[in-house]
Image (tube, rainbow, N blue to C red):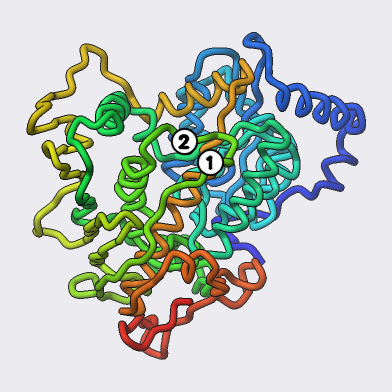
Amino acid sequence: MTPSSVTSAPLTRRGFLKSSSTAVGGIALANLAAERFALGASPGDTVKVALVGCGGRGSGAANQALSTSGSTKLVAMADAFKERLDGSLNNLKNAHKDKVQVPDECKFIGFDGYKKAIELADVVILATPPGFRPIHFEEAVRQGKHVFMEKPVAVDGPGVRRVIAAAEEAVKKNLKVGVGLQRHHQPVYLETMKRLHDGAIGDILSMRAYWNDAGVWVRSRAELAQKLGRPPTEMEYQMYNWYYFVWLSGDHICEQHIHNLDVIQWVKQGKPYDPTGKTPIVHPKRCIGMGGRQVRTGKENGEIFDHHAVQFEYPDGTYLFSECRHIQGAWASVSEHAVGTKGSCNIGGGTITGANSWRFRSEKSTDAYQQEHDDIFDAIRNDKPFNEAFYGAHSSMLSIMGRMATYSGKEVSWEDAYNSQLDVMPKTYAWDAPTPVNPDKDGFYPIAVPGKTVTF
């Protein structure tokens, strides 16, 4: 079933083929185009883009893709909710009138619409709730399409392994893959990281990472019922209020704090990442942590924690001290720091204090969100090696590992986390399908209890 006033039934693939007198020829041309773009497009070619997941971040990513140098065209869109797709389409048309060409038959609603949208494009933007990322990425690679996908790229160990396997296949097919960890494209981070890797603060002894702020939006069941004109199914509500369910967001330690954890992973890597995936990625050997729900405890807050604190131990004996919190009125910081034998560094702040004191300065202002799209589209047009899925997957695994430690209250090793068989995703996807977690008779969801909850 589909929500009556929020979504509508998608045009079926069979119906689309029947409605087009040039369908066979069109598909053949599409396949030829996909092969051409997989081998590297001419700078003058028009790159066709599909957007899967039409929320705020997806719409922003589509806007940035259409703002890259060269000819681009948005040709297809997919979302679970019709209202969200239509709103995104209208905004994108206003911003890019001539570049947005998405007729009704190329707007796909529901859980399987992504397959049809992917089929029509050269480059796919994947920006649904993160739990769907492994499924969508696999399909895009299977169809031979370049991909930009938002972070995190998975919410559990099985999902991370699927992404890495698909990333390896993408390398074989010469597909370019970007991940929305935009700090890798931000000049202050690039210059600071180069100095850290060159030894500006000596041997790094410890690191700190924070995403402490007031939190994000929340959507109530009553709001959705008003939109629908009826009580929503549990699947409808969890999809609508997706941030507050582990199978959809991974908890805010995954959905937001991954940015800071990824920066520390970059520090520990000691050099640029290998786009072929052949160079091993440095990761902690174990972690311990604590967390819970102290302030954000309503029914609409689902099952996730409002604070996490994790200590990650790396094989060389160094530690990462990690905090993320969603509590209004408390100390706020979104930042990353490192301490070494010759000084200390505020990484995002672009400052080094000590023997090699330095402050980042630039006369040019760079939008990192735009730059990450400029870079992947340049790689597509000029056939440059580009695959961020490997470090995206490992950074996602780091945040998942932290959640496993805070939920269970146990020490978690990298091997335990990475090889975990705990799959948090639903068995089937439909508006009336069972959800992985359900509320009790009073409308409250079960919450992880450290010392009792099993996470692997």
- Above or below, 160 against 147 in this view is below
Q: Quadrant of residue 325?
A: bottom left
Instruction: Please report the residue visible at 25 percent of the width from the left and 75 percent of the height from the top.
Output: 292
Instruction: Identify the residue under disc 2.
Output: 273
x, y (%) of residue 35? 78, 27
Compare marks 2 and 1 and give the one earlier in the sequence: 2
Whether residue 222 appears in this view of the structure is no
User: What residue lies at 35% left-to-right and 57% top-to-bottom?
Assistant: 315
> Separation of disc 2 and disc 1 at Cα?
8 Å
> Can residue 193 be seen here?
yes
Measured from the top left, where is residue 253 in percent x and y?
A: 33, 59
State left or right for residue 332 relative to residue 70.
Answer: left
Task: Say left or right for 447 vs 361.
Answer: right
**Residue named by callout 1:** 279
- 359 shown above or below 225: above
Q: Callout 2: helix, strand or loop?
A: loop
